[in-house]
Image (spheres, coloured by chain):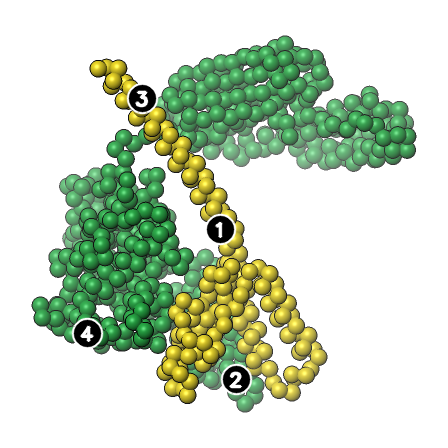
Chain colours: A yellow, B green
């Protein structure tokens, strides 16, 4: 009888030990995955801050006076924008397409509804560009939608 | 065993947490957020959205986007609160046949519990997906002021979502639980919860019985929150720009959008910096051309802007204390909850009122969900027989060259554990080493406790740094330490078994820790000095060896120069001036490099030798690189 009791205890301990080993190995695996994911998105915060700056460059470009458009110096400045875009693309950044598309809250955030000749629910204006990092939305596009 | 989910079902945001190996852990939602907006919507295509996607489409679908449902749940339509809120809500509500509230979403009328259930369902699904386990049970939090009907409705919401609601627990109680404040009996705790849209204060009493937390005071303002702070900053930006440029931006939708974002960002930044820049180039334009908005906002200015709100919150705290017939000094612990409590001025105001620091180390947006998870863990009983593993209270190591304590097993290492490291000899033809086992944090061997010592002899004669002595530390589950040393060349081995050493008395451990702290500056200097000396010794040794091996290839003049530098170094080496030792070592090293270059040149001119130039070992019981 006592032997049975010890056998039961022994089995229980062995089982618990195996569980603990398994849970540790699983933890290691999960941790490795988590670190991989972490590395992939480690730059997210930094990139978001760069995107804020890029927004202002886009605004500056949009407000460029007509008579300066052909100016070589201005062209040079704007090529710096392309350099930033190129850099961001290499980091896995992709711009979310908006204009003329159906509003989709998975990618877009509506800031206003406007009466328009377009079909209701179509994006007619982009207020702020949205971006994906490795396919994940890190900033939704802010848009105006046709009523 | 199935996990019980802890849920903070908030007015604007919700969060979930589960216990993992005895610790509460926030579970991210499908979109990767640690909190989920408490918003539900029905799109024109009949698709139901919950969380961030529902919020993003709110403007396009205001009548069918339901938010702040917590303000309605379990209330009667005739309540003054409902009548007040009704005006602020863009969606339709009406009185239900039972006197409660009904909300219209799409063509259907829903009960508030039904809407809350949709939020809970998403939270549940996301957690199940994330942790790969089915969730059936949950603990949900609610404000301390919720009455029976509101609590019941919260429970019903959970049940509709397919959750067996084990308990509806008060938010302040959950927050206090997260800080482990119920471990000591006889306390009164104040929870100061400043969220995005609401401000709540609660006083908890656990004097009678820590298992039954009594709420002895509640209050606050259901329409005061962090969003008001953002609004104030926005107003200030608009006003400053008007003063400066004469242009009113409050009518410009696009500019307002940018100002709103920048205001929130500035507020967050000012919790960690003293000043921030608000920079919005091309914010607008007039006949004279583009206009830029550039302002500096200091922390002091921000505090000035929102002073009224902070004062109001403190007044509310005082009011509640008064109602509960308490003085600030009667409160033993204060807990800060809600994102706005990150603001230093708020922390300061609370500290000034109570004359003590509040608990604020846990993320204030997550602390309630964490507490709910802890409560869930308690109810689930986690594992019946918990495997308790201890950690080493102090570091364990051995003495190495220059009386240095070289740590093998750092303090707070969970055991059973083992660690092996290879050391070497400090002198040429050294045939024995002494292993001196130490316990403590101090860098110099003599300042630590000696646990034991033994000799390993019979090491084959060799130049210093060549023999490999493997030292192993092994602590078994009973805390018994086994130290062994083995010469890898001869396989000779010696060991020592040290019992009852790991578990020192608490006082002894505390004393040693305190001493280590007290002497840390001094100790660091001593250690640096010894390391500098060891480095100097090594350099001198390696020169001697070079001269012995390849002396014929070095120019006599250069040899003399190096010898001079060595003599100079030797003069200062055993004194305590670390800077001098370092600079003389550096001098020597540079002169030696010249010699090295010369040897190299001459060797390659002759014929490349097959022998690699081995790095000199750093000496007795220093780790091999």
- Quarter of the rendering containing residue B524: top right
Q: Which residue is mark 2?
A: B285
How far apart are the alpha carbons under marks 4 and 2? 43 Å
A136 shown above or below B241: above
Query: Height in image: B92 above or below A135?
Result: below
The residue under the point 27% across, 53% down is B7
- Residue at mark 4: chain: B
Identify which residue is drawn at 69% across, 21% down.
Answer: B466
Can you identify the residue that label 1 sits on?
A: A37
Q: Quadrant of residue B101?
A: bottom left
The picture places residue B419, in percent across and down from the top left corner, at 51, 26
Residue B300 horizontal side relative to residue B7, left or right: right
Depth check: B454 or B17 in front? Answer: B17
Check residue B107 in the rendering and tell me which mark sits there, or answer none. Answer: none
Query: In which quadrant is the C terminus of chain B drawn?
Result: top right
Subunit bearing disc 2: B
Which residue does the numbered mark 3 point to in the structure image? A10
| CA distance separating discs 3 and 1 | 40 Å
Identify the residue position indicated by label 4 in the image.
B93
Which is more N-terminal, label 1 or label 3? 3
A57 left or right of A70?
A: left
Percent x, y of residue B42: 29, 71
């Amino acid at each position: 009888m006592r032997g049975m009791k010890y056998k039961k205890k022994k089995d229980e301990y062995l089982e618990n030990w195996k569980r603990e080993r398994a849970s540790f190995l699983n933890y290691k695996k999960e941790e490795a995955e988590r670190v991989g994911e972490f590395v992939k998105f480690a730059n997210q915060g930094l990139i978001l801050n760069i995107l804020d700056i890029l927004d202002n460059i886009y605004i500056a470009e949009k407000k460029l006076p007509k008579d300066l458009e052909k100016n070589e110096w201005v062209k040079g400045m704007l090529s710096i924008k392309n350099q930033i875009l190129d850099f961001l693309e290499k980091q896995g950044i992709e711009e979310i397409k908006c204009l003329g598309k159906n509003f989709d809250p998975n990618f877009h955030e509506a800031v206003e509804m406007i009466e328009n000749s377009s079909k209701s629910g179509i994006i007619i204006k982009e207020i702020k560009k949205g971006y994906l990092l490795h396919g994940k939305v890190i900033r939704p596009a802010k848009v105006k939608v046709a009523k | 065993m199935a996990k019980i989910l802890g849920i903070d079902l908030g007015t604007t945001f919700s969060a979930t947490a589960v216990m993992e190996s005895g610790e509460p852990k926030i579970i991210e939602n499908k979109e990767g957020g640690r909190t989920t907006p408490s918003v539900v919507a029905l799109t024109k295509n009949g698709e139901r959205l919950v969380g961030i996607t529902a919020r993003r489409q709110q403007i396009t679908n205001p009548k069918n986007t339901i938010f702040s449902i917590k303000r309605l749940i379990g209330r009667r339509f005739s309540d003054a609160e409902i009548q007040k809120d009704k005006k602020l809500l863009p969606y339709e509500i009406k009185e239900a046949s039972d006197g409660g509230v009904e909300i219209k979403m799409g063509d259907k009328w829903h009960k508030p519990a039904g809407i809350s259930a949709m939020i809970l369902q998403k939270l549940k699904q996301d957690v199940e997906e994330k942790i790969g386990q089915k969730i059936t049970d949950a603990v949900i939090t609610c404000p301390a002021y919720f009455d029976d009907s509101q609590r019941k409705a919260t429970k019903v919401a959970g049940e509709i979502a397919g959750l067996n609601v084990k308990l509806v627990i008060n938010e302040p109680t959950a927050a206090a639980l997260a800080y482990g404040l119920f471990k000591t009996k006889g306390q009164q705790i104040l929870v100061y919860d400043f969220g995005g849209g609401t401000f709540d204060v609660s006083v908890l009493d656990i004097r009678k019985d820590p298992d039954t937390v009594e709420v002895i005071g509640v209050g606050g303002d259901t329409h005061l929150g962090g969003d008001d702070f953002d609004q104030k900053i926005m107003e200030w930006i608009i006003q400053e720009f008007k003063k400066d440029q004469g242009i009113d931006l409050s009518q410009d939708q696009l500019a307002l959008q940018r100002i709103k974002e920048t205001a929130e960002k500035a507020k967050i930044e000012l919790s960690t910096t003293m000043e921030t820049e608000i920079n919005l180039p091309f914010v607008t334009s007039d006949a004279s051309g583009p206009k830029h908005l550039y302002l500096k906002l200091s922390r002091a200015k921000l505090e000035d802007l929102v002073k009224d709100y902070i004062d109001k919150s403190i007044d509310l705290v005082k009011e509640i204390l008064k109602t509960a017939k308490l003085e600030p000094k009667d409160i033993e612990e204060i807990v800060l909850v809600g994102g706005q409590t990150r603001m230093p001025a708020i922390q300061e105001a609370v500290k000034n009122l109570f004359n003590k620091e509040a608990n604020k180390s846990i993320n204030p947006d997550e602390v309630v969900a964490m507490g709910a998870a802890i409560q869930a863990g308690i109810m689930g009983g986690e594992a019946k027989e918990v495997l308790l593993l201890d950690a080493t209270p102090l570091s364990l190591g051995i003495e190495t060259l220059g009386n240095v304590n070289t740590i093998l097993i750092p303090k707070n290492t969970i055991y059973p554990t083992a660690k092996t490291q290879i050391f070497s000899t400090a002198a040429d033809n050294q045939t024995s080493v002494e292993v001196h086992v130490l316990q403590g944090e101090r860098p110099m061997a003599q300042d630590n406790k000696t646990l034991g010592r033994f000799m390993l002899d019979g090491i084959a004669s060799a130049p210093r740094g060549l023999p490999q002595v493997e030292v192993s530390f092994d602590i078994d589950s009973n805390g018994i330490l086994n130290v062994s040393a083995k010469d890898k060349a001869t396989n000779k081995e010696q060991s020592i078994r040290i019992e009852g050493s790991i578990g020192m008395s608490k006082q002894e451990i505390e004393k040693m820790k305190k001493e280590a702290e007290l002497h840390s500056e001094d100790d660091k200097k001593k250690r640096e000095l010894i390391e500098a000396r060891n480095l100097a010794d090594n350099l001198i040794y390696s020169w001697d060896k070079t001269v012995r091996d390849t002396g014929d290839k070095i120019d006599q003049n250069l040899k003399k120069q190096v010898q001079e530098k060595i003599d100079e170094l030797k003069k200062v080496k055993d004194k305590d001036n670390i800077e001098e030792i370092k600079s003389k070592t550096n001098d020597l090293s540079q002169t030696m490099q010249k010699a090295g270059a010369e040897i190299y040149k001459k060797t390659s001119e002759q014929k490349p030798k097959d022998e690699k130039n081995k790095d000199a070992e750093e000496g007795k019981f220093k780790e091999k690189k």
